Amino acid sequence: MEIAVKAALLASVAAVGALLIKKSNPEMALLMAFAVVVCVFSASLRLFGTIADAIDAAEKMSGMSPAVFAPVIKCVGIGVTAKICGDLCRDASQSGIASAVELIGSAAAVYAALPLVSALMSMIGGMI
Amino acid sequence: MRRAALFILFALLLALPCRAEISKAQSDALGVPALEQAVPRSAAEAAGSLSVSASFSVRDKLDEIWSSFVGDLTAHIKSGAVSAVSVLVIAVVCALASAVFDGGSLPQYINLAGCLAVSYSAVGDVNSLVSISRDALQTLSDFSRALLPTLCAAAASSGAVTSAGAKYAATALFMDVLITLSNTVIVPLIYAYIVSAAAFSALGNPAIGSIMKLIKWLCVTLMTALTLAFTAYLSITGAVSGAADAAVTKAAKATISAALPVVGGIISDAASSVVAGAGLLRGAIGAFGMVVICAVCAAPFAALGARYLLYKAAAACASALPAGRIPELINGIGTACGMLLGLVGSGAIMLFLSVISSVKAVGL
């Protein structure tokens, strides 16, 4: 709660600031946005740590193999990173770069899921 | 004095308590000991020691089977909860990730990874359930090969000469057809259903969804049609041959009584007593057979029922989350467990109907 309020306040102030300086100095506005993203991420690391612990506990309780769960976590990480990076690129009016980032993000997500595909295929092949 | 003594002796003999017992010679002649030895180990574990006798308590045995079923169900729910929690954890992670996105292609790839992980963790589980179902059907079929000839012989010696053979032949044929269909068509269709459920939830193609529905319809229709065909065949055979048997028995009795004056009536009455004894044995074999069928089905029903309920519950929980099409996949896996349950149920119901029909002797 506390972290979310602080992050929201910081983001709002930074958004207003970026809007004010965007006309005179768009590079600085973009850097400011980037800095805020880094700050918010750093602040939320503790939160993500707690969530990761909860997921880890659930994973241990369910007895699920890390080989099953790791690709999902990787895909989520790749997706979130690609999304934020793409949005930052769009803020800098670089839609092409944003699309490229999202494309590489999609390809990386598929690549991360490939071990699951091959494991599933071999399992189905073994059954049939 | 001598007459009075004889009269008292006969009067005392008549006053002795009378109890229906199965003749050992008759039971040996019909192959009951071999039938008792053919009881599958899983049935003996669920129902304890089983034997064909007039004092066989069906209720006690059913109580034992029920206790065993409840124990198995509890154990399977505990072990199956692990699989259900696994798929729910994946659904929760995918739901958390999808909250970040407001469109675009990236959420689809996260959904794809989630669906693959759910499929991977569930397919192994379903594979073990398929083995359980196949084993249960095979056990039922093997036991029917020992039960049905004995029951048929008992039914034939109690007057149902034509109908017993016809019912035995029909049951043996339909059980073989069910097992062949299960191995060659239904189980591969269930695998295809799971694969298409995984593909549909990963890719979201409506055509794959239609294929899924078609496969489910095919499986359910095949099992229902086979059971209905068997029931109809048994009804018709029972009605036609049962009436013929009744007419033949009546005609034989009348012929013996009329052809041999005085002695003919005695022979006819003695034959009726033998037939009544065979009828008693037929009832005992029928009760024994039904208890064994229940005992064979108890463990597979517990395993399949527990997984069916758990996957359906997990799908209901996951559908409350914004987890894409993962809840549909979990629901599809639950449906596959339900189809396997239906497959074992079809085999059990066919044997049940056959036993009931043979014990009842006339009609279905």
Image (cartoon, grey):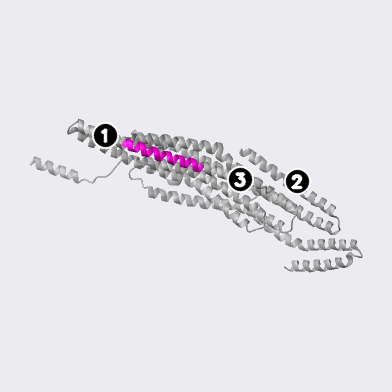
Q: What chain does badge 2 belong to? A: A
- Res. B163 in view: yes
Amino acid type, callout 1: Ala
- Res. B49 in view: no
Viewer-nearest of discs 1 and 2: 1
Residue marked by disc 1: B251
For the residues bearing labels 1 and 3, Cβ distance under 8 angstroms: no
Residue marked by disc 3: B212
Res. B267 image quadrant: top left
Viewer-nearest of discs 3 and 2: 3
> Are dots 3 and 2 on a single chain?
no
Q: What chain does badge 1 belong to? A: B
Which of these two is toward me, B352 or A72? B352
Amino acid type, callout 2: Tyr
Quadrant in the picture for the N terminus of chain B: top left
Which of these two is toward me, B159 or B129? B159
> Distance from label 3 to label 2 (Cα)?
27 Å
Magenta region: which residues? B223-245
Estimate the x, y position of residue B287 in percent, counting from the top left. Answer: 38, 44
Q: Earlier in the sequence, mark 1 or mark 3?
A: 3
Q: Is residue A34 left or right of residue B188?
A: right
Asked if B252 appears above or below B17 in the picture, the reply is: above
> Distance from label 1 to label 3 (Cα)?
58 Å
Could you tell me which secondary element the residue under label 1 belongs to?
Answer: helix
Estimate the x, y position of residue B275 in percent, counting from the top left. Answer: 29, 37
Residue marked by disc 2: A111
Identity of the residue drawn at 29% across and 42% down: B21
> Distance from label 1 to label 2 (Cα)?
82 Å
